[in-house]
Image: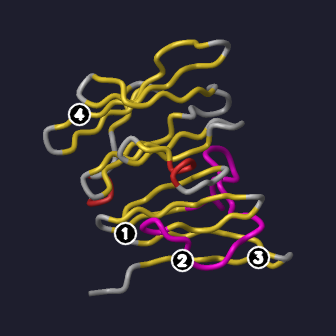
Amino acid sequence: ELDKSVFGERWESEIIRLTIDQDNYVTANSGAFFGWDRYTLYKNGKAIRNLDGQFTAFSPNVSLQNVGGKAVWEFSDAEDSVTVIFDGVDLRKRYNLDKAYRPYGFGDKLIFVGEKDGKQFIVYDGHKIGHDFDLIHIAYFCEPVLWSVTFGQGKYVFWAEREGQLYVVEVALPEE
């Protein structure tokens, strides 16, 4: 229930709404733009970020959540626009990444999967932690979602591969 309270509520298939304190955030498909769909993150009715993608097997407008009082938007188009927007900032650009996936909050700190030059790894609170992997399994629909990154109850769990070896990795905060 605590995890559910930090995630935005999906309205229809393409709109997600989230309230953080007095601020209202909405992500929505705001129409076609040069052959792509334009998706927009709004804060109190004002557009603060646009991303282009296409609804293929799933909506690229994946999730909207509250991490430490800041809005976190996961956007995953099947092609180039795979990123996490944290407090209005594209984390691909902030950390010089090719892609960013599957954000989750540990308290006030953000954890997500980063990808650079064909290697995938975990970024926690702005720092790369742990090993590089050849593949961290990430899926949003169908059977592969069973092996995708999962999170909740203070744990971040994923299947990964490195040099032909399969790993199950769990990242958890130390108990207080």
Gap between marks 1 and 2 measured at Cα: 12 Å
Say which residue appears at 41% left-offset and 24% top-offset: 12
Instruction: Name the front one of labels 4 and 1.
Output: 4
**44 left or right of 109 in image:** left
Q: Which residues are magenta?
A: 124-149
Disc 2 to disc 4: CB gap under 8 Å: no
Instruction: Name the front one of labels 2 and 4.
Output: 4
Residue placed most toward the observer, 151 or 65: 65
Disc 4 to disc 1: CB gap under 8 Å: no
Q: Position of residue 83 (x, y in %)?
A: 56, 45
Viewport quadrant of the N terminus: bottom left
Q: Which residue is mark 1?
A: 153
Q: Which residue is mark 2?
A: 170
Gap between marks 4 and 3 measured at Cα: 41 Å
Amino acid found under the numbered disc labelled 1: Gln
Residue placed most toward the observer, 108 or 94: 94
Gap between marks 2 and 3 measured at Cα: 13 Å
Indicate how the structure is coloured in the image. Answer: secondary structure
Query: Which of the marked residues, 3 or 1, is nearer the chain's N terminus?
Result: 1
Query: Which of the marked residues, 4 or 3, is nearer the chain's N terminus?
Result: 4
Q: Position of residue 175 (x, y in %)?
A: 32, 86
Gap between marks 3 and 1 measured at Cα: 24 Å
Gap between marks 2 and 4 measured at Cα: 33 Å
Amino acid found under the numbered disc labelled 2: Glu
Q: Which residue is mark 4?
A: 24
Q: Position of residue 136 (x, y in %)?
A: 68, 64
Q: Which mark is residue 166?
A: 3
**81 left or right of 12 in image:** right
Q: Secondary structure at mark 1?
A: loop
